[in-house]
Each structure stands twice: as C-alpha cells, then as structure tokens.
Amino acid sequence: MTQPTWPSLEAIAQAVRACRACDLHRTRTQAVPGEGPATARVMLIGEAPGAHEDRTGRPFVGAAGKTLDRLLNLAGLRREQVFITNLVKCRPPKNRDPRPAELAACRPFLRGQIALLDPVLIFTLGRFALQYFFPGARIGQLHGKPVQRGSRWIVPMYHPAAALYRPALAPVLEADFRAARPLVARLLNTQA
Ligand code: SF4
C-alpha cells in the first residue's frame, strides 16, 4: 500500500484529529497529534496519551510530563526545543497497552512526522516506542544506549511514567538522560 506523504505537521495534526481508523476514536475525548517546533532536531516518542493528554489534546502534560521536563533539562534540552508525540494518538481506555491493530493503523502519522522533521536524535520512551525501531528488543537491555542509524541517533529510554509507579527506575532514567547530554550537545552544536 502506498503511504501518504504529508505537506506539513499541521496537515498531519488535522488528519489525526479527524481520524477514525481504529477503535480508539470511539473512546477518546481529544486526539493528541503531538507538538513542538517544525524545526525541532530532537524528537521524543512515547506510547499513547493518558488521561490528562486526552482531556487537553497535548502530549505529556500530567505528572509524567513534569518528570519529562526535568529529564530533558538533565540532557541539556528544553521542551520548547523538541517535538513530542506518541505511537498512537488516541488514549487507550484505562491506559491499557495499545493493540497491534491500533499501532498499525496509527503508524502512517508517526512515519509522516519523522519524515517531515528528519530529526538527528530520537528518544524513544518505553518498550513500545523502542520496538517501533527495534522489534523484539528489550528496554531493560537497551535503555540509555545510543544507536546510530545513518545520520540519525536513537536513544531508548524508560517511559517517564514508569518512574512514577516504579520509584527504583527514577535514578536510572535520570542517569540515562544525563549521560545523553554530551551526544545532544555534539549533535546540536551546543555546550554540554
Ligand atoms: S489512535 Fe491513531 S489510528 Fe486510531 S483513531 Fe486515533 S489517530 Fe486514528
């Protein structure tokens, strides 16, 4: 099947808000296309919107969002610099895992966002986002380890929400984001 090519991130966002390609459209309050500058060189990809995101239509705005802001700072980044989105753009009921059919239906949107942004660095957040790039990979083995793919780097991270319900992961996440700081500085030509 030919994949759609999108003229802009806003065109993708509009298509997401109107999308009914999977059952998640039935239970969403608002779709959450993702946000950040069209010039962003760093992208963060999570799993799916949660309750706060579903209400506001914005990614990572709840407690996990506050954690993410702090983690970004450790890596030498600010939220305004990065583009943040999820694998699926509508909230799964009761925050259950996204199903394979939902992941497949939503894939063209993320693919389009990556193609338009062409980021030099992608942080994947959690195991589902990791497996988008590395099918079958385990987050416990790959977290914090940058992988180069052509001119792009992918850094798998635990999901910031994991630190909220598994406090032992908080220092691991902090160490991984802090360790990414020199790579961020090198790729963006900034001070570490
Ligand atoms: S999750 Fe993705 S594919 Fe499913 S309805 Fe929402 S935007 Fe469409």
Image: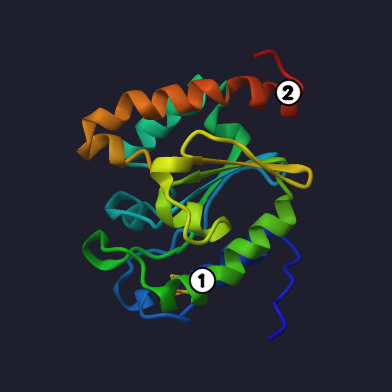
Q: Residues within 10 Å of mark 1 (few under 14, many from 20)?
A: many
- Residue nearer the viewer, 25 or 124: 124
Q: Residue at x 64, y 14 (%)?
A: 192
Residue 108 placement (x, y as % from top left): 61, 71
Q: Is mark 2 within 8 Å of ligand 1?
A: no
- SS under mark 2: helix
Which colour style is shown?
Answer: rainbow
Q: Which residue is mark 2?
A: 186
Q: Is mark 1 within 8 Å of ligand 1?
A: yes
Looking at marks 1 and 2 on the same chain, the residue that comes earlier in the sequence is marked by: 1
Is residue 60 at least partly visible in the picture? no
- SS under mark 1: helix
- Residue nearer the viewer, 108 or 34: 108
Residue 95 placement (x, y as % from top left): 26, 59
Residue 47 placement (x, y as % from top left): 42, 55
Left or right of 146, for residue 57: left
Left or right of 139, for residue 163: left
Say which amino acid is labelled 1.
Cys
Q: Residue at x 50, y 28 (%)?
A: 72
Q: Which residue is mark 1?
A: 106
Q: Are marks 1 and 2 in contact (CB under 8 Å)?
A: no
Q: Residues within 10 Å of mark 2 (few under 14, many from 20)?
A: few
The quadrant where residue 80 appears: top right
Q: Residue at x 46, y 70 (%)?
A: 103
Say which amino acid is labelled 2.
Arg
Left or right of 177, for residue 109: right
Residue 58 placement (x, y as % from top left): 44, 50
Instruction: In the rendered view, tell whether residue 153 sits above or below residue 93.
Output: above
The quadrant where residue 71 appears: top left
Q: Closer to the camera: disc 1 or disc 2?
A: 2
Most extreme residue toward the bottom is 1
